[in-house]
Amino acid sequence: MNSLPTVNPWIDQLAPYVAGSAKAPGHAHPVKLSSNENPWGASPRALDAMREAAAAAHRYPEGSATILREALATLHNLDPDRIVCGTGSDEILQLIPSLYCAPGDSVVYVRHGFMVYPIAARRAGAEPIAAPDTNYTADVDALLATIRPDTRVVFLANPNNPTGTMIPASDVARLHAGLRPDIVLVLDQAYAEYLDAPDPDGALALATTAANVVATRTFSKIYGLGGARVGWATGPKAIIDNIAKVRAPFSVSNSAIAAATAALADQAFVATCRAENNRLRAELVSAIEGLGNHGLTAIPSVANFVLMACPTQGPLAAPAIHAGLMARGFITRHLPGQGLPHAVRISIGTEPETRGVIAALRDLAAA
Ligand code: PMP
């Protein structure tokens, strides 16, 4: 008789989420360009609010983060009762398939997409199905062709991580129009603030008007609060209420609520980070293009990172570049597990960090 606990077979198939490394051997202070964080940190106002909130660390937070939901509703012109906050947007993304899928159903996402989606599907016992993309960009026709009768949830990150590409609002609308109304479309806008538009792909608008669309956002990227773990979603009241039912009680801490609310009030900081990011991203892209004769290309990015396609062999193959940058103190991301064995993802750093990684790339190419 087997006396050991037996894990659910669908969990057994799961590969754990592997976060980007924070260490480069031999470098006490490496430059971390592996997790698409904000290299300028968070708004000083958010940090002050966080310190103040520490005084109430012995109290549980207000359970539904009302202050934060109201601030989000004001900024984005939404209904606060149709917003739910979570421990990062990850918490919310992870819960959605468990609400709408039975074991054996399917969840569709884009190949070269965010690795949390297949994990979220498997957690619910659902089968994750990757739709093909075109030139590292979501392909609406391919997505629609991948939908099966048992598909319950579709995930689309727009801009997408790890490719940095984006499809326009018209394509998002076409995707929505082509889906059965019983499928939940999750539009993940983690990097939306890097575009200079309040709702660059129309996800918030769609989540307001459609009965089956949820839009998610995060404070981990342009707001510089990845360590505070706070994200949010908006959508139809029924779906938001269902997410709220299953999220962990008090999943957003006092300090996270305070920091995120203060961060929202400092849109000047957001605008500065966006402008600096986009200027330095252009520098990195043109430096990579300048190395085109070495077989390196930059996938066009609208986010705070660039996916660099590398030759399949030789000294500038992706594993060699990743290791070479690491040896020079720059931590980047090689993602063979996401179907990208021949690419390296480089997050945009501060000006000295970005120029440093450019110099290191040129150094590797010259070797
Ligand atoms: N969506 C995408 C596309 C991401 O890249 C990330 C972070 N890597 C997230 C969601 C999750 O962010 P968080 O849980 O920190 O809000």
Image: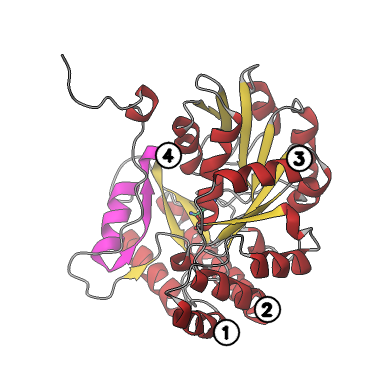
SS assignment at label 4: helix
* Kind of residue indicated by mark 4: Gln
Helix, strand or loop at disc 2?
loop
Q: Which residue is mark 4?
A: 338
Q: In front: mark 1 or mark 4?
A: 1
How far apart marks 3 and 1 lie (CA) works out to 37 Å
Residue 45: numbered disc: 1
x 64%, y 41%: residue: 242
| Sequence-earlier tag: 3 or 1 | 1
Q: Quadrant of the C terminus?
A: bottom left
Secondary structure state at the residue bearing disc 3: helix
How far apart in space, not on screen, are marks 2 and 4 (Cα)?
36 Å
Badge nearest the viewer, 2 or 4: 2
Q: The residue tagged with tag 1: helix, strand or loop?
A: helix
Counting labels gives 4
Q: Is residue 199 above or below residue 142?
A: below
- Give the CA distance from mark 3 to mark 4: 24 Å
Tell me which numbered mark, 2 or 4, is placed earlier along the sequence: 2
Q: What residue is shown with label 2?
A: 265
Range of residues picked out in magenta = 318-338
Mark 1: few, some, or many residues within 10 Å (few <14, many ≥20)? some
Residue 274 point in image, percent of width and height: 63, 71
Whether pointer 1 and pointer 2 mark residues with C-beta atoms closer than 8 Å, the reply is yes
Residue under pointer 3: 171
Rendering coords of residue 154 (x, y %):
63, 34
Amino acid, disc 1: Arg
For marks 3 and 4 on the same chain, the one whose residue lies earlier in the sequence: 3
Q: First in sequence: mark 3 or mark 2? A: 3
Measured as percent of width and height from the top left, residue 55 is found at 45, 83
Front-most of 364 and 123?
123
Query: Residue 334 in magenta?
Result: yes
Q: Is residue 13 magenta?
A: no
